[in-house]
Amino acid sequence: MRFTRHLGTSHLGTLLYDRGMREIGGFTVGRELHRTGVVRVLLAAADRREAFVAKVCEPDVEVMGERGAAGAVREFVARAEANREIGENRECADGGRWARVYHVGRTPDGAAAVMDLATLGTAERLIAGRGALDSVALAHVIGEVVEGLRDLARGMKRGHGALTAGNVLLGGDEEKGIAGARVMLADAAVDLKPATESRGTQGKEPATECRGTPEDLRGIGELIHGLVLHTPFKGGWPIENSPKWRAFGADGSTWRELVNVLLDPNPKAARPTLDELAATIAPMRVPRKSRRGLWTTLAAALILLGVAGGVVWHYTHREKITIVKWLEAPEQHAAEWRELCEAYRGWYSLFQAGLGKAPTGALRGMGFGTRREAYAATDPQLKELLSLPGVADGFDPWSIARVGRDVELGVLSATPTDYARSDEGIEKTEKARAGGGARKRGWPEEGEGPGRWREAGAR
């Protein structure tokens, strides 16, 4: 493909494509979409699909000089190649949150690259358009950005380095809205700081925690600020409450406090990791009416996040929570938590619920105040059961997670709170499972019928 250049004073840098010569790397180039600096962005198609854009960098030598133009082209190629490598990384490709670069090549006057098209525009367009997002749509965009950065940290041990609203692309079906859009990151910088940290304990393989670079964490804060207030962040900190934050309902406090943490100008201020950001945002991706009273963003009133080495600061309870073990083996601990919740959905919760009630039958007139006292004094097998941690106060899923008994166990099983994910919570879960899983002591198997323990709980 050959480019010619019109050098008239009113058209400096305008590219004129020769008729019939509008192809880049097998992609047909169409109309121009916009221009940023020395880079033109044009619609491109392949196999009759207009799902791509061609970025063409052909600096005007007369304006920039030979050295400046050559440097701009080298920088363009290096960045395009770096982003092609990101898109081809298995972790990033599987996640689907990075725009793919399909072609990078030289042209007679510069270089060009072809990548995915943002069919719904960019986050920058959302900010400029001043259209109000609800909390679920905002959480979807920010949550996918965070997940994309986690994919990059796990796959390539690096961060984005140039995260702006213009580099957050939105694709997919317009009818599904922003909450259903495909969110893609693009145009990462070339040289990046490490975005992960290996933490190991004696006798264990090191676990990788996605921490995020300071630049990326600040970029997330500025993105939230822009999408809510429709204005760039100019340094006024802390962010004060306003009607635009209150428009998000109870979630508004969480978003505002999160922005304040991310944009704190103190360089020594604690920052959340990408893992902790993902955990904070995840509940808000679900409509409030579907959260079923979970201790999420609201009851936690902001998981915000004085974080250092896996320590989370909960403002409502004024205490620090250490989350290290969960990050070392998240799948294992999540499975153990689900197992405990499932156990309580059956006979075990029925048995425990009756312990505080007055004894019945033959035990009624023996002077015991509760069934717990009666069983402990009169029945060796039930006494053994009562001594197990799972039956002691504070070892049931609701107590470990610090939520009310009205929270449905199926929801709690799928969405453990930070208290459940904490090191203390994991220890309690392990002790409760050691009791609840001790079927060798006579605990009934699933589907075995009422059994001795069910009868004890029901009588």
Image (cartoon, helix red, strand yellow):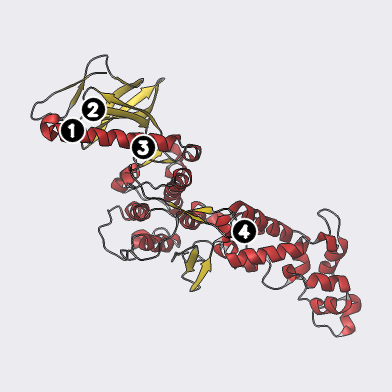
Which residue type carries mark 1? Answer: Ala
Residue on which the image places disc 4: 412
Label 1: how many residues lie within 10 Å, few (<14), some (14-19) or many (20+)? many
Residue 401 can be seen in this image? no
Where is 28 relative to 252, above or below? Answer: above
Label pair 4/2, CB-CB below 8 angstroms: no
Label pair 1/4, CB-CB below 8 angstroms: no
Task: State the residue at coordinates (37%, 31%).
Answer: 115
Task: State the residue at coordinates (84%, 65%).
Answer: 453
Label whose residue precedes the other's in the sequence (4 or 3): 3
Label pair 2/1, CB-CB below 8 angstroms: yes
Q: Secondary structure at mark 3?
A: helix
| Cα separation between marks 1 and 4 | 58 Å
The image's mark for residue 82 is 3
Label whose residue precedes the other's in the sequence (1 or 4): 1
| Cα separation between marks 2 and 1 | 8 Å
In the image, taking residue 99 as reference, residue 415 lies left or right, namely right
Task: State the residue at coordinates (70%, 59%).
Answer: 340
Which residue type carries mark 3? Answer: Ala
Which residue type carries mark 4? Answer: Leu
The image's mark for residue 110 is 2
Residue 322 can be seen in this image? yes
Where is 152 relative to 54, above or below? Answer: below
| Cα separation between marks 4 and 2 | 56 Å
Q: Position of residue 104 (x, y in %)?
A: 34, 28
Quarter of the view holding residue 78: top left
Quarter of the view holding residue 378: bottom right
Label whose residue precedes the other's in the sequence (4 or 2): 2
| Quarter the N terminus occupies | top left
The image's mark for residue 69 is 1
The image's mark for residue 150 is none
Q: Secondary structure at mark 2?
A: strand
